[in-house]
Amino acid sequence: QSTLKSWVHCILLSPVQVANNMMDMDQDPRKRLCFADGRRKVDYVLVYHYRKRSSVRGSPSQHRLSIISNGSYPLGVEEKDQEGRKDEPAEVVVDVGPPDPADGEKIMIREEFEGNLKDAGLEIEHDKENKAHGHAFIRLHAPWQVLSREAEFLKIKVPTKKVRHSRDLFDYQRNLGNSRMSHCYFWPFCRYNIKSKDTFFDNATRSRIVSLYCFAHESSFQPEWYNMIRLLHDEWARYGAFYKYQPVDLIRKYFGEKIGLYFAWLGVYTQLLIPASVVGIIVFFYGWATVETNIPSQEMCDEDQNFTMCPLCDRACDYWHLSTACGTARASHLFDNPATVFFAIFMSLWAAMFLEHWKRRQISLNYSWDLTGMEEEEVHSHTYIEHPRPKYETILLQKRQRKKKNTKNKNETGHEKLTWRDRLPGYLINISSILFMFGVTCSAVFSVIIYRITISALMAMSSDPEVKSNVRVTVTATAVIINLVVILILDEIYGMVAAWLTELEIPKTETNFEERLILKAFLLKFMNAYAPIFYVAFFKGRFAGRPGDYVYVFNDYRMEECAPGGCLIELCIQLSIIMLGKQLIQNNVFEIGIPKLKKLCRTLKDKERAPKEIVEQPGRRQQWHLDYDLEPFDGLTPEYMEMIIQFGFVSLFVASFPLAPLFALLNNVIEIRLDAKKFVTELRRPDAIRAKDIGIWYNILSGLGKFSVIINAFVISFTSDFIPRLVYQYMYSETGTMHGFINHTLSYFNVSNFKPGTVPSISSLGKDITFCRYKDYREPPWSTEPYQFSKQYWSVLAARLGFVILFQNLVITMSMLVAWVIPDVPKNISEKLKKEKTLLVDVFLNEEKEKLQLIQSLFSRDLTQEQQEELKVSDQTSLPLQQTQPGQLPPTSSPAPRTRPRAASFSQFTRQMSMSPRSDITQHTAV
Amino acid sequence: QSTLKSWVHCILLSPVQVANNMMDMDQDPRKRLCFADGRRKVDYVLVYHYRKRSSVRGSPSQHRLSIISNGSYPLGVEEKDQEGRKDEPAEVVVDVGPPDPADGEKIMIREEFEGNLKDAGLEIEHDKENKAHGHAFIRLHAPWQVLSREAEFLKIKVPTKKVRHSRDLFDYQRNLGNSRMSHCYFWPFCRYNIKSKDTFFDNATRSRIVSLYCFAHESSFQPEWYNMIRLLHDEWARYGAFYKYQPVDLIRKYFGEKIGLYFAWLGVYTQLLIPASVVGIIVFFYGWATVETNIPSQEMCDEDQNFTMCPLCDRACDYWHLSTACGTARASHLFDNPATVFFAIFMSLWAAMFLEHWKRRQISLNYSWDLTGMEEEEVHSHTYIEHPRPKYETILLQKRQRKKKNTKNKNETGHEKLTWRDRLPGYLINISSILFMFGVTCSAVFSVIIYRITISALMAMSSDPEVKSNVRVTVTATAVIINLVVILILDEIYGMVAAWLTELEIPKTETNFEERLILKAFLLKFMNAYAPIFYVAFFKGRFAGRPGDYVYVFNDYRMEECAPGGCLIELCIQLSIIMLGKQLIQNNVFEIGIPKLKKLCRTLKDKERAPKEIVEQPGRRQQWHLDYDLEPFDGLTPEYMEMIIQFGFVSLFVASFPLAPLFALLNNVIEIRLDAKKFVTELRRPDAIRAKDIGIWYNILSGLGKFSVIINAFVISFTSDFIPRLVYQYMYSETGTMHGFINHTLSYFNVSNFKPGTVPSISSLGKDITFCRYKDYREPPWSTEPYQFSKQYWSVLAARLGFVILFQNLVITMSMLVAWVIPDVPKNISEKLKKEKTLLVDVFLNEEKEKLQLIQSLFSRDLTQEQQEELKVSDQTSLPLQQTQPGQLPPTSSPAPRTRPRAASFSQFTRQMSMSPRSDITQHTAV
C-alpha cells in the first residue's frame, strides 16, 4: 500500500516579513505580491518539489478529499492529494535511482487537481522561470465571484454602521476598517450592493475562503492593509511595548481567530497576574516583617534552650544543637506563616475569577469577531480540520481492501468505520507507553534522591571539615540542577512520544488529533515537571523512620530527611529553581536559540547543495522564496503548554511560594513580545483557523484550578507547620501562647537505644548525653509504649485532615459562588444581541412587504387577467399584510390545478425567492 | 397609581375535557369548537368579567405590552392590558358602589385592544347570548396568513420526508403526523407550496402563534386530532398504563415543550430509579443475610459478655445490660454494613449518570422537537414571558413620575431602569426573612427535641412499669409524627413566603421571577424537610457529655443520646417516616383532596350566587363555560419541587437508607399518572411555553448531586460504625478479627464519680458495681488523665476525617469521569445534524442556480438590450456559477452609474430576492 508523503507545500506571502527583511527590495510591493499582470493578487502559493533525481516512494496517496464547499461540482472533484499538512515531514524522500514511474502519475494527479481548482473558479499562474530551483511555485488568485459565493456559505457577517435611531433602519453603510467595531451591527454577508469589490473582504476572510479549495492563506497588497501589518510589527512585536494592551483585533485580522484567541488569552492571564503578584509580595513582606516577633523561630534560635538533637547520619555525624539551624528557621517563616493560608485561599479564588473573566472576554471577542450565534460545528465544518486525516483514510482503505480480499463480496457498502478492534493495538501501546513514561519519570526522581543520599553520606564521611560544612548546600544545588536538566530533556522527549502515540490511535479528524495529543502531552509533561516537587512536598522525610529504627535504602544509606526548618523551605527552593530555570532556558534556548540555529543550518545546507541555482537569479528572489525559507508553523500547542505548566506553578503550590505569580508575570511580559516577534518575523505565516474558544485548554485550566485547591490544602496542613502550631496553641499550650512549641514538637530518644554501629563515633557533645531529641510526635522512652505515636500525633493528624476537608469545601464553594455571581455574558453584549434581534424582525417585515409589492408589480405586467385571478386565490397566503376583514372567510384553498404551467412557474418563482437555505426546503409538490 | 388587576381571563378549549365530562353533549364537536359559521376554528377565548355592580378599583393598568412579533404595526399597539397571567388573582374585586367611571374607560381600552387584534389579522366573534351570566366570552380565530407569517418568524421547522439517496435531494414530501419523526429532516417553515392550509400547523404550533397576540392557546377540531387527545387520555392518564413509556411527543404536542420536558424528565428519573432500587434491595438483603454472622452484633447480644452500662437518665434509671439492646443492634446491621459504603459510592455515580443521561435525552428531544440550533434567547424572545412583568412596569412608572416631579426636567430619556437602590428594601426584607425562616425551622427542630427530652424524662419518672418500658417507642413515634406535621405545614407557608419575597425583589421578567422564586422556595423547603434529619445524623448524641459530666438543658433535663445500636438506625427511621409520610400526604391530600374540595366549594358558591342565570340556559352551557370552571394552572414549580426534594431523599442520606430509591420508584410510578390525570382532566389547559431545557432545576439537581457526596461521606464516617470497626480490626485487634470490638468501644466509669443526686435511686444491679460502661473513647478512671479523650479517640477521628477526604475526592473524580465519558450529544443526533448540514449546502447551491436562471429569463424578456449589457457589467458577481477562464481578468468593477433607474430597480430586486433576514442588511448604497 501507499505510504503517504506530502509532496506539495503551501506557503503564503506575508508583507511583514517583507517589512522586516526586505526593506530595500527594488520592486514595489504591489508588483511583488501579484500575478504577472500586476493586478490580480496572489492569494495563495503552492509549492511542488520538482527534482528530476528525486521521487516519492510508492504511489501518491489516493485519498478523497471532498471539498464540501465546492458544492456546484460535488461529484467531480474526488481523487486529490493532501497537501499543506504542516505536521507532515517537509522534505520528500530523495531517491538516487532512476525516475520513478510514479512521477508521471504524480504529474497527472497534479494536473487534475489544478483542473479542479480552475473549475471551482480559482485562477492559477504557473511559475516558469523557477523550475530549475527544485521547487515549482504555483500561485492562486480567488476572483470576486468565488469569494462572494463562499462568503455566503460561511455566513460571514459584515459590519454595518451603527443605527442611530430605530426609525431609519435602512440608513446602513458599510463601515469596514473602523476599529471601533463595538458600535457596529453585524449582518450575514450578501453579495448584492457591495461597492468596492476588490477591497471588501479583509485578510482573514479571504484566507478562509481560499483555504476551502486548497487549505490556503492569503496576503494583501493594499497600501492601507500593508500599513496595518507594519503597525503590528512596530507596535506589538517589540519589547518596548510591554506595558501596552495588545492590538488583538489586528492580530486576529492577520493571523486568524485561533491565534488571536491565544494572544488575547495570554493577555488576560498576564493582566490578572498583576493583582496576584501584588498580594504575593505583600504576603512575602508580611513574613519578612514578622520574622523577628515569631516565637517558634525565636525559640529555635535561642541558644539558651539547648536542645541536643540526634545525629543526622550514622556514625559519621555528631549530635548537634538546634540553634545552629536558626537560619533556615527564620527563612522558613518567610513562607510559612498564617498569611500563606490566606494567600492560598486568595489564589484559588483568583483562579476561578481568571476562568470566569476569560469566559467573558471570549464572548466579547466572539461578538466583535462575528462568531456569536454560530454553533461549534459550524465553525469547523467548512475547514479542512474537520476532514478525515490522511492517515485515517489510508488505514480505512487498507481495511476495506483486506475485507474485499477475504470476503469477495462486491455488494459491500462504503460506509465503514474503524472500530475499536482496529484501534486496539494502538490503545494498548498507548496505555503501556504512558505507564512506562510514568515509570521513567518516577525513576528519574528516585535516581536524584539516591544521588542526594549517597553523595551526602559520602561527603559526611570525608575527613575534610570544609567539605562537611558544605554538604547540604552542595548536594541540594547539584540535585536541583540535575532535576532541571532531566525535566527539560524529558519534556522534549515526551512531546515527541505524545505525538507518536496519538498517531497510533488513528484519530479521525485534525480536531480529534489535536485534542488527544494535547491531553497526552499535558499528562506526561505535567507529571514530568511536578514529580520532584510532589516528592518534596508530600513524601520527603516521611519515610525516614526514627532514631534507633531508621529506614535504609541499599542497606547502607539512611532515607533523607527535611531540613530542620521544615520541608516547606525545601519545597520553596525546589519550586523557584525549577520554575525560573525552566522558563529562562525554554525562552532562551528553545524559543530563540534553536530556531536560529536551525535556520542557520538550513541556509548553510542550501548554499552547499545548490550554489549554482542561487547564482542564476542573484538578488531576484521572489517573495515566496523568502517566505519558504522561514520556519514552518508548528501549531499553538507548545505555546499553550508552556503557559499551562506555568499556571500550574502559579496555582498548585502557591501556598509554599507566594512569589510565583510575580515571576510568572515577569516571564509573561517578555513571553508575549517574544511570541509576537516569532510569529511576525520568524515563522511562515500560519493558517488562519477559525475558533470560538481555546478548546480543551480551558478544561485543562479549570481542572488545574480544582486540583490546586486540594493540593494547597495538603501543602498547608501537611507540609507547613501551620496546623501543629494551631493545635499547640489551643490544645496543649498552658499559657495560650506559642511559647514552648519547639519543645513540644521534639520527642525524646534514649541514646542507649541506638543500634550497634550507629552511635556517633567521634563526638564532642556525646560524653554526658543520655537523651537526644528528634522532630516527631512519639512517646518518650519512659512511657509504657516507647517510641509509639503519641496522642499528640493523632490529634494533630486529625486536625490536619479536618483542615483539608474544611479548606477544600470552603474554597470550592467560594469558587462556585464566584463563578455563579459573575455572569458569563457581559451585559453590554447581551443587550446588543437583543437589539440586533429586534432590528432583524423589523427589517424582515419591511423587506417582505417591499419584495411582495415588487413581485406583484412585475407579474401584473406580465400575466393575463385570468391568470392573475387564479393567483389571487392560490397565493393570497403569500401576502401576510393584506387585511382580511373579520368574519369574512377567505376562499377555501382547494388543491390548485396542476395543469397550468404559468401558475406553477410563479409558485416556483416565489419559492425560489426565499433564497436562503434556512427557509426553503419544505416540500416540492406543486400547488 | 393604579394597582394592577387582571380583568380578562384567557381560557382555551380542551377536547379532552369534552371527552371526559361531556360525552353525551348533543352538539357535534365540530360545531361546539367553532365560530357560529361552523367553519372557523376557535383558537382562543378571552373572558371579560362583565357585571354591572362590579368594578375594578383604580384605573386599569396602563402598561405597554409591545407585541414584538406584530412587526407590521410596531408602533400602533401600545396601551394594552396584561391578561392571562395565571398567577394574578382570578376574581376581580367586587364593589357594591355605583358604576365606576373607570368602567367606561375599561370598555374603551377593551375596544382598542380588540381593534388591534383585528388589525393584526385575527378574527373575533363576540358572544351575545351569555352576557347576563357575568362573563363575556370573546372567541378568536387565527387565519392562515397570520399563522404563516408568524411561523416564518418563529423559524418553525417542518418535517420533510426522509431522503433515501443523496441523488434525489428534491424528492421531498410533507410527512406530518408521522410518529416516526426520527426519519425526517426538518427545515424552517416557508409558506409557499403548502397543500393543506387548514391542517398544516399542529396544535402546539398554532398555539404559539396565536399566543403572540393574546397569550393564547388553541384547540383543534379535526377528527384525527381529536382522536390523538383521546388517546392521551386513555393511554397516558390512567394508572393501568403505569408500566408503559409515556407518549412524550403527544404530550408535547398538546401541552407544549415545557410540560413535555417535565414529563420526559420524570420518566427518565423514574426509569433510572429502577436499577438504583434493585441495587438498594440487594444491599438491604446483604445486610439481612449477614446479620447472623456479624461479630459486633453477636457480641452485643451475647449475654455472657456482661457489660453493665451506665444509666440512661439521672436517678430514675437503673444500670442496664448491653445485651438487652440486642434487637436494635441487629436492626442496625441491616443498614450499617460494608455494602452501604459501596451503595453510597454507587448512588453518587448514579446521580452523575442520571444527569448525563438526562442531558442526552434533552438533546434528543430538542432535536425531534425542532429546537436544535436555536439559541436560548430565541426560544423565549417571542413569548410573553420575556416581557417586563406588570409589577416591574408599575414600579418603574412610579419612579419615573417621582423623578419628573422632583427634577422638572422634560428632556429625560425613557431608558430608565430599576437600580439596586430601588430594590434595596426588597433585598433587605428578603435576607432578614430568610434568616428568620431559618430560625423558625431550627426552633421547630429544637422544640421537638425538647419535647422528646421532657416527655421521656417524665415518663421515666413514672412509677408505672408499663409506661417505662415503652418510653423510647412512644417518644420516638410521637416526635417523628410531630416533625412530619410541622414540615408539612411549614412547607405550605414557605411556598407562600417565597412568592411574596420574590414579588418584593421586583424581578424584571417572568423568567427572572420564576428562577428567583424557585431558588428561594427550594432553599426554604429543603431546609425545612432536612433539618430534623441533619440533626439526627450529625448532632444527636454528640453533645450529651459523659457520665459524671452530662450536659443539661434547662438545668434539669439531660441532652438525648442515640439508641445503643447507634444513631444510624434512628436516622433510618426518621428518614423513612418523613419520606413516606410526606409523599403519601402530599399526593393524597394536597394533590387530590384539596383540589377536589376547592372545586366543590366553587360549584357550591356559584350555585348559591347565580341560580337564576344557570336556569336560563339549562344544559346548554358552552365548552368554554365548562373549561372556565376548571382549576387554573399554577405552573410546574410545585411538581418539580416535590420531585427534587424526593431526589434529595434518594441521594443525600442514601448511605443510611438503601431502600429510599425503591420507595421513590413506587411513588413516582403513581405520581406520573396522577399528574397526567390532573393535567388532562382537572386543570384548565395550560399555556404551551417553549423551552429547551428544565432550566434552573438542572442546576439544583447537579448541586444536590455534589452535596450528596460530602453528606454521604460524613454519614458513613461519622454516623455509622464503619470506620471504628476498620480501625479496630487493623490497628487494635490482637487477632485481626472483630472479636472484642464492643469491649473496645466502651469506656469505663467509676460510679463513685457520679455527681451527688444522679446515682440511680433504686437499683437491682447497683449493689456490687464499681464501674459502669458507656460508649465513647475516653481514658479509664485509673489513667493519669481520667475521662479525657484517649489515643483511640484521636486515631479513629483521624481515620474518619481521612475517609471523608478519600471518599469525597474519589467519588467526585469518578463522577467527573462518568460525565466526561458519556458524550452530551447522542451519536445518532450529531450524525443527523451533520447530514442535514451537508444537504443544506447542496440544496442551497441548486436553488441559487435555478433562481438566477429564472431571474435572467424574466428580465431578459423585460429589459432592453442596452440595459442588459449594463447589467452584465454591474451584476456579473451575482452569477457565481458563471465560469471565468483562468488568466482572463473580469472587467474592473467601476462604480455603477447612479442615474439609471432600471438598473437600480433590478439591483433592488435582486437585493429583495434574498428575502431571509439572515442575508440582507449589508448596506443600501445604490450600485
Image (tube, coloured by chain):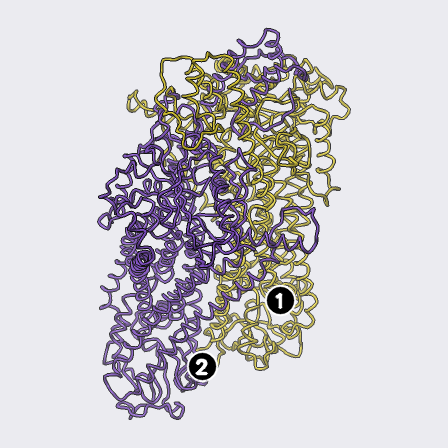
Chain colours: A yellow, B purple
Instruction: Look at the picture and state if B541 lies above or below A246.
Output: below
Q: Which mark is drawn over residue B560?
A: none
Instruction: Look at the picture and state if A728 lies above or below B754.
Output: above
Which of the 4 image quarters holds residue A129? top right
Q: How far apart are marks 2 and 1 (CA)?
A: 31 Å
Instruction: Look at the picture and state if B64 lies above or below A464.
Output: above
* Observer-nearest of A226 and B817: A226
Q: Residue at x 24, y 67 (%)?
A: B291
Q: Quadrant of the C terminus of chain B?
A: top right
Mark 2 chain:
B
Instruction: Look at the picture and state if B777 lies above or below A704.
Output: below
Measuring from the top left, give residue B770's x and y in whole percent.
Answer: 33, 90
**Type of residue at label 2?**
Gln
Badge 2 marks a residue whose secondary structure is: loop
Q: In which quarter of the image is the N terminus of chain B?
A: bottom right
Instruction: Evaluate if marks 2 and 1 touch, with contact meaning CB atoms under 8 Å apart.
Output: no
**Type of residue at label 1?**
Asn
Apparent side of residue A209 relative to residue B825 in the rendered image (left or right): right
Badge 1 marks a residue whose secondary structure is: loop
Q: Residue at x 42, y 67 (%)?
A: B799
Could one spot residue A751 in this view of the protein? no
Which of the 4 image quarters holds residue B664? bottom left
Q: Looking at the image, how many numbered discs can be counted on the residues?
A: 2
Measuring from the top left, give residue B339's x and y in whole percent.
Answer: 30, 61
Q: Which mark is drawn over residue A337?
A: 1
**Which residue lies under the disc numbered 2?**
B788
Apparent side of residue A197 relative to residue B488 in the rendered image (left or right): right
* Observer-nearest of B582 and A289: B582
Mark 1 chain:
A
